[in-house]
Image (cartoon, rainbow, N blue to C red):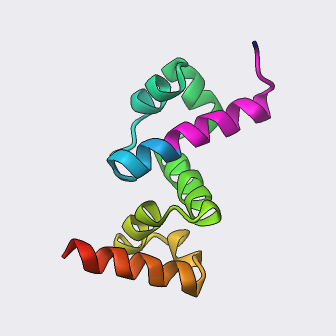
Amino acid sequence: MRLDPKERTETLLDAALRLAAADGWQALTRDGIAREAGVSYALVTQRLGTMEQIRRSVMRRAVQQRVVCVVAEGLSRGDRHAGAADDALRAECAALMGERK
């Protein structure tokens, strides 16, 4: 079944967020996202753009969906989109990072 462009973008971002949670936000690649979503590299590029754009979109989604491990990585790297996390999410991230030390 062919998805409309907005649905396809959402599906790709879901796949990218799963990968970021499993392997790390900075470890994201278009190839990995394409494999996870079962689509071509070209479609990932067409729908999501550059790696900078992909990471930004994934971090925004991670903050919205409260994916602590991804947001914590963004905070540790000074990502401004991770910095938009509310205080409760930041506290969860700090607790996670404290456990990893």
Taking the view exactly as shown, the residue that stands out farthest to the right is: 4
Q: Residue at x 41, y 63 (%)?
A: 69
Taking the view exactly as shown, the residue that stands out farthest to the left is: 101
Per the picture, the main secondary structure of the magenta-coloured stretch is helix
Assess whether residue 5 is covered by the magenta stretch. yes
- Residue 49 shows up from this direction: no
Residue bounds of the magenta highlight: 2-16
Screen quadrant of the C terminus: bottom left
Q: Position of residue 5 (x, y in %)?
A: 77, 29
Q: Position of residue 77 (x, y in %)?
A: 35, 70
Q: Residue at x 60, y 42 (%)?
A: 13
Q: Position of residue 36 (x, y in %)?
A: 47, 28
Looking at the image, which is closer to me, 52 or 61? 61
Q: Residue at x 51, y 61 (%)?
A: 67
Assess whether residue 33 is covered by the magenta stretch. no
Count of marks, rendered view: 0
Q: Position of residue 68 (x, y in %)?
A: 47, 66
Screen quadrant of the N terminus: top right
Measured along the vertical axis of the image, is residue 62 above or below residue 82? above
In the rendered structure, the answer to whether residue 69 lies left or right of residue 41 reads left
- Residue 70 shows up from this direction: yes
In the rendered structure, the answer to whether residue 70 lies left or right of residue 2 reads left
Looking at the image, which is closer to me, 46 or 22? 22
Q: Residue at x 81, y 25 (%)?
A: 4
